[in-house]
Amino acid sequence: MKIKAANTILYCKHWAETVAFYRDGLKLRILASTDWFVEFKLNEAARLSVANEARASIKSGDGRGVTISLQIADVEQIQADLSSAGIASTPIKEVWGARAIYVRDPEGNRLEFWEGRAKA
């Protein structure tokens, strides 16, 4: 199997707020958008999409069992950027040999931003 790209789709009860969180709070670029589905670009091969559960056959997981883990270059800068956007994060923690912070989107999904080299 050769995977060319990956897209995680979050089905949301709080769709408009969740779209605003990723668009305005995290400043992710929109690649595609309809009145119930938005696809954001994470990098050249990864996407994150938000779908309105009211228009989809799959319902929200209410944030249970989901962590979106994103490796970034500078955890302090991300924390400052999030704070400037009104998004509260946890304090920086040492996790698996990396430094990480955590936030929750309006749907309750956990996002982990980490830097460094995690131990295998």
Image (spheres, helix red, strand yellow):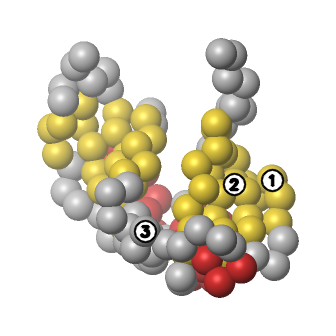
Return the residue at label 1: 31
Q: Secondary structure at mark 1?
A: strand
Q: How many labels, in total? A: 3
The residue under label 3 is which amino acid type? Gly
Check the picture and name the quadrant holding the C terminus.
top left
> Closer to the camera, 103 or 66?
66
Q: Nearer the viewer, mark 3 or mark 1?
A: 3
Residue 83 is at least partly visible in this image: no
- The residue located at (65%, 71%) in the rendering is 57
Return the residue at label 2: 40
Instruction: Give the image quarter of residue 44.
Output: top right
Check the picture and name the quadrant holding the N terminus.
top right
Q: Considering only order in the chain, which callout, 2 or 1, is on the residue closer to the N terminus?
A: 1
- The residue located at (71%, 79%) in the rendering is 55
User: Dot 3: within a 10 Å radius of its alpha carbon, few (fewer than 14), some, or many (20 or more) residues?
Assistant: some
Find the residue positioned furthest to the left: 94
User: Dot 2: within a 10 Å radius of its alpha carbon, few (fewer than 14), some, or many (20 or more) residues?
Assistant: many
Q: Considering only order in the chain, which callout, 3 or 2, is on the residue closer to the N terminus?
A: 2
- Residue 104 relative to residue 55: left or right: left
The residue under label 2 is which amino acid type? Phe
* Residue 63 percent across, percent down from the top left: 38, 68
